[in-house]
Amino acid sequence: MLMYASPSLSMLQGSKQFKHAILKNLLLGLRKGGVASRDMSFHERKNAIRHAADAALATARGVAPCWSRSLTAELSHGRHLRHAKSRPSECKSRSKMVCKNKILRRSLRPRPKSKATAKAARVVVARTMVRRRARALREIVPGGRGMDECTLLGETLDYAVSLKAQVDAMQLLCYC
């Protein structure tokens, strides 16, 4: 997909020029995808809009961040791994059960005997929480599975700022 990209946009993440590039790329992608066609079903139209929005974001951001390259590769191969489907009813019941199990485990957990073992236990819990949160970020950020924690945090920050710019650009379409 040939789109408009400016090399100076890499440092202007939240700027008007970056949002303008996203908007221009999005309009080109929507036009190319034929979203205005009446022959498309609701789900086909939704997927075409999502595909155009992701392609516009990755193209406007450039090749500097890993998430942008990964998202471009996913889109070019016809895969779309960023939006995994899940069943909401299962997630709710599972999260309640996990919460109950955590409370039960905490109440049954033996207390450390000395300050040194208490500190060691806190360190283990903190490391476990960091690993769990990093695992969640790896699932959210495109290309995050192959990154260490430091790189992952930087890419997550860049991706979140870019997503905010994408939302702002798409809201401009709604209010036109």
Image (cartoon, helix red, strand yellow):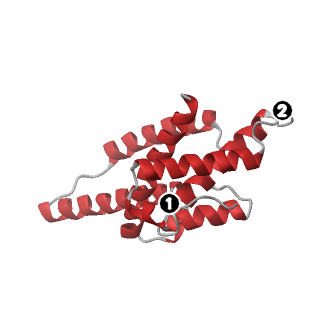
User: 116 left or right of 143?
Assistant: left
Q: Quadrant of residue 11?
A: bottom left
Q: Is residue 83 visible?
A: no
Indicate the quadrant containing the N terminus: top left, top right, bottom left or bottom right.
bottom right
The image shows residue 161 at horizontal and vertical percentages of 41, 51
Indicate the quadrant containing the C terminus: top left, top right, bottom left or bottom right.
top right
Q: Is residue 60 visible?
A: yes
Mark 1–mark 2 CB contact (< 8 Å): no
Secondary structure of the residue carrying tag 2 is loop
User: 161 left or right of 38?
Assistant: left
Of 104 and 33, nearer the camera is 33
Sequence order check: which comes first, mark 1 or mark 2?
2
Mark 1 lies on residue: 61
Tell me what residue is drawn at x 50 percent, y 68 percent: 66
Mark 2 lies on residue: 38
Say if 65 sits above or below 110 in the image. below
Tell me what residue is drawn at x 68 percent, y 62 percent: 2
Tell me what residue is drawn at x 53 percent, y 57 percent: 60
The amino acid marked with disc number 2 is Arg
User: 44 left or right of 51?
Assistant: right
Say if 25 sits above or below 68 in the image. above
The image shows residue 100 at horizontal and vertical percentages of 44, 37
The image shows residue 102 at horizontal and vertical percentages of 40, 44
The amino acid marked with disc number 1 is Arg
